[in-house]
């Protein structure tokens, strides 16, 4: 049981940032409560593998309670935070319960952004949770089943909107499924004739990477069979397809399965915090935090991860925005924990400093791009070597030995056989 005499630390969210913050407090004289609306920590970089049938959900997710079984100062609760009283230091849950705190770390993450067109969500699900992955997998596999019923592959188009890491990974894997995984499994259609289209509104895919790697990614995707279209802005989405404004004018694109990977918005808790504390938000709804990741005027509240519009502060250099990637969230979690302990000891807090390790993305079998930051300068490469590096890097950062072993075995089997074993759906009906 928590000790009422010890400082009570409440962490909202068990993603990368929340997990690292809790772990950094394992030896601290505080009691930590983690509240999340799901009961697991999710390794989001591999979520697209669940959506495309390559991995099962338990391979990339771990029950939060099991992760903190040995950390006696941590209590995990299942609940959804809907309100925050900064003055009374209380958090309101959806079921009416209230949780007190002396220090609050908000790591609620991000959600999909449809740029004001939330009605598109019903026709083009995004990919942020296991539920999202199951829905995309259902739509992807049932599209082939419906084509088999009709004995028609002509309308079997798969469209991914957004050319960032998630978009290129989904598009490349969809092409691999059509051309290799499903070979010889159907009798009335040829899955290899299915078309995968990747739409990117900007001039190139993987815009955060150097132009050379971006061009390499485009070429690798095309070799995998993906129709890459840049400068393509989506103007409408319905159950049958999309309306697109392209370089040569508007056109209609039919789609049997559309996936949205084009926009990210901060968790709605950002607006809750703004109402409770008067803190400022950026255009994406992220909270503008102080250099030490706390809220201006509210040092007992810190915001980290995708919800924070944080900057990296290095002496002698102008502040730089922190990208919304898992290493950034982890580093913010550790910094927030250190600063919390510094406040308890009456010591000054430290400004957050982000260490950039680089970016990498896989595009499909033997295809990837890597941009690493090293002491000697950037190291950039693509193709088979980048694919191997991506594979082992993701296995290394997975949570738990069992998950690492299972994923490595699944990938080894898929490499030699092209099979994707998690191709199971339980309903023909779309998610409500």
Image (cartoon, grey):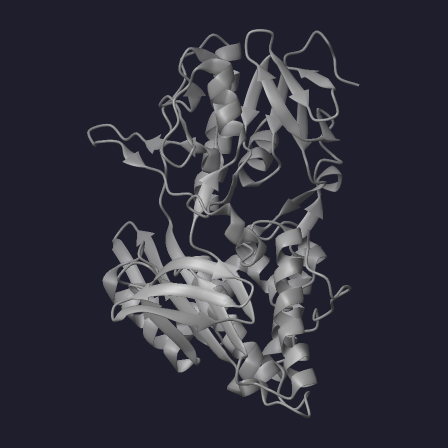
Q: Quadrant of residue 328?
A: top left
Q: Quadrant of the N terminus?
A: top right
- Left or right of 323 on screen, residue 93: right
Identify the residue shown where x is 55% and y is 12%. Answer: 86
Vertical side of 289 occupied by 240: above or below: below
Q: Where is residue 57 in the image (x, y as percent from the top left)?
A: 69, 57
Tell me: 183 left or right of 71. Answer: left
**Would you identify the image quadrant in which residue 29 lies?**
top right
Image spot of residue 214 (x, y percent): 30, 65
Residue 6 locus on image (x, y percent): 67, 11
Q: How many marks?
A: 0
| Above/below status of 257 relative to 116 | below
The residue lying at 55 percent from left, 24 percent from top is 105
Residue 382 appears anywhere in the view: no
Residue 103 in view in this figure: yes
Dividing the picture into quadrants, the one containing residue 22 is top right
Q: Give 270 or 304, whichever is nearer the viewer.
A: 270
Q: Nearer the viewer, residue 347 or 407?
A: 407
Question: Image height check: is 198 above or below 16?
Answer: below
Residue that extends furthest to the right in the rendered view of this protein: 1
Q: Nearer the viewer, residue 16 or 265?
A: 265
Picture coordinates of residue 345 (x, y %)?
51, 10
């Amino acid at each position: 049981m928590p000790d009422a005499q010890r400082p009570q630390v409440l962490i909202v969210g068990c993603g990368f940032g929340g997990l690292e913050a809790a772990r950094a407090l394992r030896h601290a004289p505080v009691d930590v409560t983690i509240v999340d609306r799901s009961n697991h920590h999710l390794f989001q970089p591999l979520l697209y593998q669940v959506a495309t049938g390559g991995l099962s959900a338990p391979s990339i997710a771990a029950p939060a309670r099991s992760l903190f079984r040995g950390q006696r100062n941590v209590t995990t609760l299942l609940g959804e935070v809907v309100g925050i009283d900064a003055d009374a230091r209380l958090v309101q849950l959806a079921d009416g319960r209230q949780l007190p705190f002396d220090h609050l770390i908000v790591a609620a993450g991000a959600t999909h952004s449809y740029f004001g067109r939330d009605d598109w969500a019903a026709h083009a699900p995004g990919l942020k949770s296991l539920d999202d992955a199951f829905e995309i997998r259902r739509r992807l596999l049932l599209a082939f089943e419906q084509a088999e019923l009709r004995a028609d592959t002509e309308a079997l188009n798969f469209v991914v909107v957004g050319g960032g890491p998630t978009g290129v990974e989904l598009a490349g894997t969809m092409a691999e499924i059509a051309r290799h995984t499903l070979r010889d499994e159907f009798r009335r259609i040829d899955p290899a004739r299915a078309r995968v289209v990747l739409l990117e509104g900007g001039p190139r895919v993987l815009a955060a990477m150097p132009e050379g790697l971006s061009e390499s990614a485009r070429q690798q995707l095309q070799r995998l069979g993906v129709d890459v279209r840049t400068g393509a802005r989506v103007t409408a989405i319905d159950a049958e397809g999309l309306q697109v404004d392209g370089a040569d004018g508007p056109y209609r694109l039919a789609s049997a399965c559309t996936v949205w990977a084009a926009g990210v918005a901060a968790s709605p808790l950002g607006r809750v915090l703004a109402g409770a504390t008067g803190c400022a938000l950026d255009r994406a709804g992220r909270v503008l935090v102080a250099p030490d990741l706390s809220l201006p005027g509210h040092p007992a509240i810190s915001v980290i991860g995708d919800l924070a519009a944080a900057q990296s502060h290095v002496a002698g250099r102008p502040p730089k925005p922190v990208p919304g990637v898992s290493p950034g969230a982890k580093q913010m979690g550790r910094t927030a924990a250190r600063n919390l302990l510094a406040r308890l000891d009456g010591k000054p807090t430290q400004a957050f400093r982000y260490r950039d390790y680089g970016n990498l993305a896989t595009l499909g079998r033997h295809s990837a791009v890597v941009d690493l930051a090293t002491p000697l300068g950037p190291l950039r490469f693509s193709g088979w070597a980048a694919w191997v590096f991506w594979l082992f890097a993701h296995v290394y950062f997975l949570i738990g030995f069992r998950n690492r072993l299972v994923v490595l075995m699944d990938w080894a089997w898929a490499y030699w056989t092209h099979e994707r074993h998690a191709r199971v759906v339980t309903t023909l009906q779309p998610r409500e």
